[in-house]
Image (cartoon, rainbow, N blue to C red):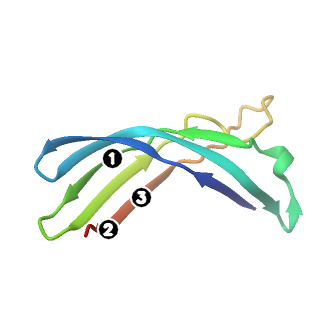
Amino acid sequence: MKLDFINIPVLVNFYVAKGFALKIGLQPGFRVNAKDAGNDVKDSFESFNLSLPIGLSYEFKNGITLDLRGTPALTSINKNSNSDFKLRSDCSTLTIGYKF
């Protein structure tokens, strides 16, 4: 099964020390594709989901930035509301970047 979502993280940074920030926000996600063995199954999944990104980042003096973020889902992505089985889209990310 392949589910494709476009996620748009909207975060607020709280700088607690020089170069060090705590992050929190909301991340809406929009389903663009849902296939299982080549068959379209998008009617089985919600077209929208919402997550809560929480993380921290550190920017070194040389411009390199490390960002660690956990993004637990607040909503289920399956449409079958009669089931106790809920599908969620949780993720964790580690980003290494350069600011110039």
Question: Left or right: 82 with respect to 54?
Answer: right
Question: Left or right: 37 with respect to 49?
Answer: right
Secondary structure at numbered mark 1: strand
Q: Residue at x 82, y 62 (%)?
A: 36
The numbered mark, 1 or 2, whose residue comes first in the sequence reads 1
Q: Report which residue position mark 2 lands on.
A: 96
Give the label on residue 55, or none: 1
Q: Residue at x 44, y 54 (%)?
A: 92
Q: Dots 1 and 3: beta carbons under 8 Å?
A: yes
CA distance separating discs 1 and 2: 14 Å
Give the label on residue 93, or none: 3
Q: Quadrant of residue 98?
A: bottom left
Across and down, in percent, residue 58 comes to 21, 56
Q: Residue at x 10, y 50 (%)?
A: 18
Question: Left or right: 31 with respect to 66?
Answer: right
Secondary structure at numbered mark 3: strand
Q: Which residue of the protein is positioned furthest toward the front in this rendering?
A: 100
CA distance separating discs 2 and 3: 10 Å
Mark 1 crowd level (few <14, some 14–19, many ≥20, 10 Å Cα) = many
Secondary structure at numbered mark 2: strand
Residue 83, compared with residue 23, is above or below; it is above
Mark 2 crowd level (few <14, some 14–19, many ≥20, 10 Å Cα) = few
Total numbered circles = 3
Mark 1 belongs to which amino acid? Answer: Gly
The numbered mark, 1 or 3, whose residue comes first in the sequence reads 1
Quadrant of the drawing holding the C terminus: bottom left
Quadrant of the drawing holding the N terminus: bottom right
Residue 51, compared with residue 100, is above or below; it is above
| In the foreground, 74 or 85 | 74
Q: Residue at x 19, y 60 (%)?
A: 59
